[in-house]
Image (cartoon, rainbow, N blue to C red):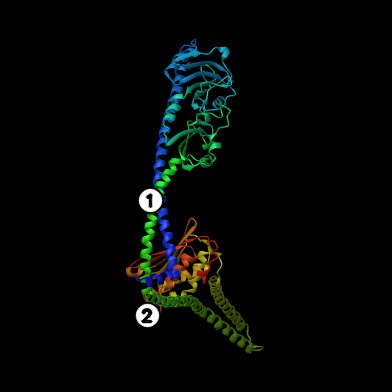
């Protein structure tokens, strides 16, 4: 590529824009690669967080399971011994059995008034029974209030907190959880069997899971820290300090609110957290979950991972930018040599678009002509039907006029009683015949008026489906007579529809005319049956004829425009295409066809009630 040509290419606005887009694309690819690499790094961090959270969760749940089982077994032993030895002291029984569970720190019975009736303390492998004068009233403690309203005979667990004796936190701090059973009937009366379990060893084990890169933290749902690398922040609620996780990590708490877990959320100080809510009792609300386990990755570690993804992404962006500029200039040079061909192609494209537009206009005109032709068929049919009754009425009236003239000639001296009676009898018969013919004419005109009114309406109207088909059948009688076609209507019960009656009438007319023109030869067994049945909020209309059927090579394209097997007879091939368009686009239904030798069935599935549609272009 010569330098002069290169200068000409670069001077073009399109080339400059392409260069800018290439640079943008290179940056976008680099950014996508960065996101991909960062996603891998994030997935590694998330995997580490999840593994640490899962391990902590398993240890905690294992301890909770042991606590529930131990509480249940201790209560059963106490109840069993007391039931056989009513003189035994429960505190002495528990002093013996409680030593079997190393994590037990207290066992006591609290009556329904909140008073301790006995308490046994456990420390350093020894049990000590608390004297009665040192027993306390615990009615103000939250776990007593909750347990008294809990399900009887079920083990419930308190929140994890520090043990409090005589209103003061026990020192050294003893993280405690209580297993409680609410008894309504017991040897000791109604009350609570309460077992305190110290969690010092569990907290120490969980604290040991913390590494230099990823730290495990635990907080209550109220934001009170239970486990934190900085021990001075722990147990803020019990120690009346102002240190809580919802204040130090407000963004994290806003994110986890109402959720069971979150992953890789950055806090205000740039550290990355994952969290999961851990329930140690049956709760109905996420906000009631007892503990939230966090894993924290420091900002320093996360930024190191960030830059390990950023550097290769930048290098790749530069490489792609160089290659894309090279290939772009090469393409622009080729584009200059092909500009003439492109111009010619645009001209041909414009000509093709014009031809397609003209074809569409022609198709629209043919569709309108087909609609007018179908209306003309109705008009000619009604005119043919009216010819007979109106002609009969005219003949009757002419006969009446002639007999009136004869009566006038017989007046006054030639009129006999016999002639008068004959005149009256003839007039009565002629009047009845004229009334009959005129009534038939009026009925035909009324039916045609209903059909023509429906055809001219573009509004959704409520109407009787059976009556619409009956009126249409009467209007098409001359067409049916040409090939001796019998049209039957099978309607177990009438269906009232709310849709476009004119479109539905036009659709059924096209199907009937299609059968007459294509399915039948002139013989006496031609039959069309239109059946109606309702299925929930749909109506199914079946148009079935016993004609010669549709060939397989035509059936798959039967609803395409300009498809006809009788073009020589003047058919345009738009009848069934219009049927499909009206059924699917205007009436909001479906149509299918099944055909074999001796039978063709068109099945229309339409909604009983159609909602109004602002776009009535298909009606026009």
Task: Estimate the spatial distance between the alpha carbons at disc 2 and disc 1, rounded to whole Å.
Answer: 73 Å
Residue labelled with disc 2: 568
- Mark 1 residue element: helix
Q: Residue furthest right?
A: 412
Height in image: 289 above or below 425?
above
Residue linked to disc 1: 312
- Quadrant assignment, res 393: bottom right
Residue 451 relative to residue 56: left or right: right
Disc 2 is placed on an element classified as helix
Quarter in which the N terminus is drawn? bottom left
Q: In the rendering, at what x and y percent does residue 129 appear?
A: 51, 13
- The residue depicted at 46 percent of the width and 24 percent of the height is 200
The answer to whether residue 224 shows anywhere in this view is yes
Which quadrant of the view contains residue 43?
top left
Instruction: Count neighbours of disc 1 (C-alpha within 10 A) and say few if under 14, some if 14 to 19, many if 20 or more.
Output: some
Q: Choose between 304 and 570: the one closer to the eye.
A: 304
In percent of width and height, residue 538 lies at 48, 58
Looking at the image, residue 148 sits to the left or right of residue 209; the answer is right
Residue at screen point 45% across, 41% down: 300
**Nearest to viewer (mark 2 / mark 1):** 1
* Above-or-below relation of 474 to 199: below
Residue 109 placement (x, y as % from top left): 53, 18
The x, y position of residue 584, in whole percent, is 46, 65
Front position in the image: 3 or 46: 3
Marks 2 and 1, the one that precedes in the sequence: 1
- Depth check, front residue: 456 or 261: 261
Q: Relative to 225, is 492 above or below?
A: below
Count of marks placed on residues: 2
Residue 525 appears in the figure: no
């Amino acid at each position: 590529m010569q330098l002069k040509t290169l200068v000409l290419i670069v001077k073009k606005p399109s080339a400059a824009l392409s260069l800018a887009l290439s640079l943008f694309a290179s940056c976008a690819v680099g950014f996508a690669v960065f996101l991909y690499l960062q996603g891998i790094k994030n997935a590694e961090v998330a995997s580490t967080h999840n593994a640490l959270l899962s391990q902590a969760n398993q240890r905690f749940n294992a301890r909770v399971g042991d606590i529930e089982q131990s509480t249940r077994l201790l209560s059963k032993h106490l109840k069993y011994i007391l039931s056989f030895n009513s003189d035994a002291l429960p505190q002495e029984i528990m002093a013996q059995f409680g030593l079997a569970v190393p994590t037990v720190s207290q066992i006591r019975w609290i009556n329904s008034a909140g008073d301790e009736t006995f308490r046994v303390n456990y420390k350093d492998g020894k049990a000590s029974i608390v004297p009665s004068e040192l027993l306390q009233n615990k009615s103000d403690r939250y776990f007593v209030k909750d347990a008294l309203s809990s399900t009887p005979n079920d083990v419930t667990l308190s929140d994890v907190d520090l043990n409090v004796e005589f209103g003061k936190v026990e020192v050294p701090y003893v993280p405690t959880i209580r297993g409680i059973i609410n008894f309504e009937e017991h040897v000791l009366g109604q009350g609570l069997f309460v077992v305190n379990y110290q969690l010092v060893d569990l907290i120490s084990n969980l604290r040991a899971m913390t590494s230099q890169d990823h730290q495990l933290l635990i907080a209550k749902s109220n934001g009170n820290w239970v486990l934190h690398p900085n021990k001075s922040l722990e147990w803020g609620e019990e120690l009346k300090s102002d240190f809580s996780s919802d204040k130090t990590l407000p963004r994290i708490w806003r994110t986890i609110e109402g959720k069971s877990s979150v992953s890789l959320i950055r806090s205000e100080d740039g550290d990355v957290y994952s969290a999961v809510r851990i329930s140690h009792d049956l709760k109905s609300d996420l906000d009631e979950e007892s503990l939230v386990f966090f894993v924290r990755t420091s900002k320093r570690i996360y930024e190191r991972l960030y830059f390990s993804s950023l550097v290769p992404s930048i290098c790749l962006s530069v490489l792609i930018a160089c290659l894309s500029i090279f290939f772009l200039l090469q393409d622009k040079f080729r584009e200059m040599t092909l500009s003439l061909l492109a111009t010619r192609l645009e001209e041909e494209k414009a000509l093709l678009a014009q031809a397609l537009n003209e074809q569409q206009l022609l198709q629209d005109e043919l569709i309108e002509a087909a609609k007018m032709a179908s209306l003309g068929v109705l008009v000619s049919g009604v005119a043919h039907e009216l010819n007979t009754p109106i002609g009969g009425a005219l003949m009757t009236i002419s006969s009446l006029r002639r007999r009136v003239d004869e009566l006038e000639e017989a007046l006054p001296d030639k009129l006999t009683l016999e002639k008068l009676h004959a005149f009256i009898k003839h007039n009565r018969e002629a009047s009845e015949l004229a009334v009959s013919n005129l009534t038939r004419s009026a009925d035909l005109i009324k039916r045609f008026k209903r059909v023509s009114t429906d055809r001219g309406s573009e509004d959704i109207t409520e109407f009787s489906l059976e009556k619409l088909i009956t009126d249409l059948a009467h209007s098409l009688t001359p067409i049916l007579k040409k090939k001796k076609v019998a049209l039957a209507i099978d309607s177990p019960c009438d269906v009232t529809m709310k849709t476009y009656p004119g479109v539905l009438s036009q659709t059924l007319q096209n199907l009937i005319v299609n059968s007459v023109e294509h399915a039948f030869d002139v013989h006496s067994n031609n039959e069309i049956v239109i059946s109606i049945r309702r299925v929930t909020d749909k109506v199914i209309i079946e148009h079935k004829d016993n004609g010669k059927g549709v060939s397989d090579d035509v059936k798959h394209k039967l609803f395409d425009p300009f498809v006809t097997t009788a073009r020589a007879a003047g058919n345009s091939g738009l009848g069934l295409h219009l049927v499909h368009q009206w059924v699917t686009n205007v009436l909001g239904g479906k149509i299918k066809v099944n055909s074999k030798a001796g039978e063709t069935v068109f099945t229309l599935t339409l909604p009983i009630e159609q909602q109004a549609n602002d776009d009535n272009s298909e009606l026009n």
